[in-house]
Image: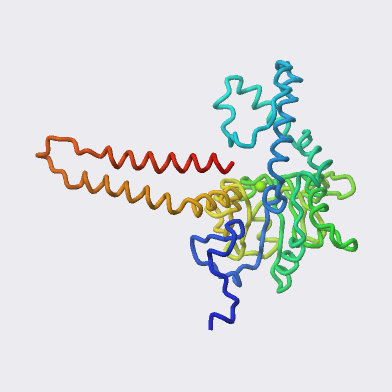
Amino acid sequence: MLRRYSYVPKSEIAPVSRVFVNRSLMLEKVKFYGFDMDYTLAVYKSPDYEALGFNLIRDKLCEMGYPEAIADFEYDPSFPIRHDIHNIYPNKFDVLFATEYVHRKDGPLKAETIKGKEKYVIKDDRLPILLDRMRARGTKVFIATNSDYMYTNKIMSYLLDYDPTRSWTSYFDFIVCDARKPLFFSEGTILRQVDRETGALKIGSHTGPIQSGHIYSGGSVDVFSEIMGAFDKEILYVGDHIFGDILKSKKVRGWRTFLVVPELAQELLVWTDKRQLFAQLEDLDVMIGEIYKNLDSSCQNKPDISKIQHSIRFLASSDLKLENFHT
Ligand SMILES: [Mg+2]
């Protein structure tokens, strides 16, 4: 019976292609698929994109009066710091200011990304197929991104420019920019329509039905649900931000959620590669536990676990040496 479903054993699916679930989910009950854009639909090329961000911040710091010597600093992908840069560096306010400036809506990072999109953004020709298949049986697909219209338009046009007769907007039933997530999942902001020629927001809040191909700005989950006739449990939202995309939509609204974690692929690779080592280390750890478990309060002497400790150190260091040998 199983043979009918060209079953692929779990071990043969590349970690990067696996989906992990923490509860069962009937996909036929999903009537709305929603996507974040940055780092979800638009995946940036590593380490080129990080290097771009690094260089722009470095140049901004020079412009602000930092020593010329830092202009020679190069981005080192093996030294990544996530989010806590201002806890480590003493001049954290300068660095924070430069970082915020570079990432601003009208800042240089977005402008440079658009200019060099082939270098910085991953293009996947399966995306239009996926989006069309999702909608084939009446399921609706939408984007809710915090990016503004100008940037969203440029990036999505690039990602979905396979068919010259189709605009990227025709792949979606509803497009909202400047969503202000996580605020979008609570009170939200006023929903306005975007003038696609100028990028300007039309005056007054949008009323009436949503039209496919039109682009909206702001709004809230309540407005979205009302206009689309969506019930919270029918929505599956895909995003990369645990707080802005996932936690709020799930806790406040009960949306189904799908978190994109690119780092997991590397973690899994290490886990699979080093499984034997982890098992050996765990065995040794259990042995130490056993020795201590058999002690009682009358025992005067500390048990000798030095041999086991030695084995642990030996295993860990031989693995490191092997690692250095390979790289
Ligand atoms: Mg994102």
Query: Looking at this rendering, what residue extends furthest in the bottom direction?
Result: 1
Q: Nearer the viewer, residue 246 or 113?
A: 113
Is residue 259 rendered to the left or right of residue 106? left
Indicate the position of residue 302 as horizontal and vertical percent values: 18, 35
Indicate the position of residue 109 as horizontal and vertical percent values: 76, 36
Q: Nearer the viewer, residue 35 or 325?
A: 325
Query: Looking at this rendering, what residue extends furthest in the front direction?
Result: 325
Is residue 145 rendered to the left or right of residue 311? right
Q: Quadrant of the C terminus?
A: top right
Is residue 318 rendered to the left or right of residue 245? left
Indicate the position of residue 21 as horizontal and vertical percent values: 52, 61
How is colour applied across the structure in the image? rainbow
Q: Nearer the viewer, residue 36 or 275?
A: 275
Which residue is at 59% across, 78% downward? 5
- Residue 316 placement: quadrant: top left
User: What is the number of callouts on the image?
Assistant: 0
Which residue is at 54% across, 80% downward? 2
Is residue 19 rendered to the left or right of residue 105? left
- Residue 180 placement: quadrant: top right
- Can you say whether 74 is above or below 277 in the image? above
Query: Looking at this rendering, what residue extends furthest in the left direction?
Result: 298
Indicate the position of residue 276 as horizontal and vertical percent values: 43, 53
Q: Nearer the viewer, residue 148 or 269?
A: 269
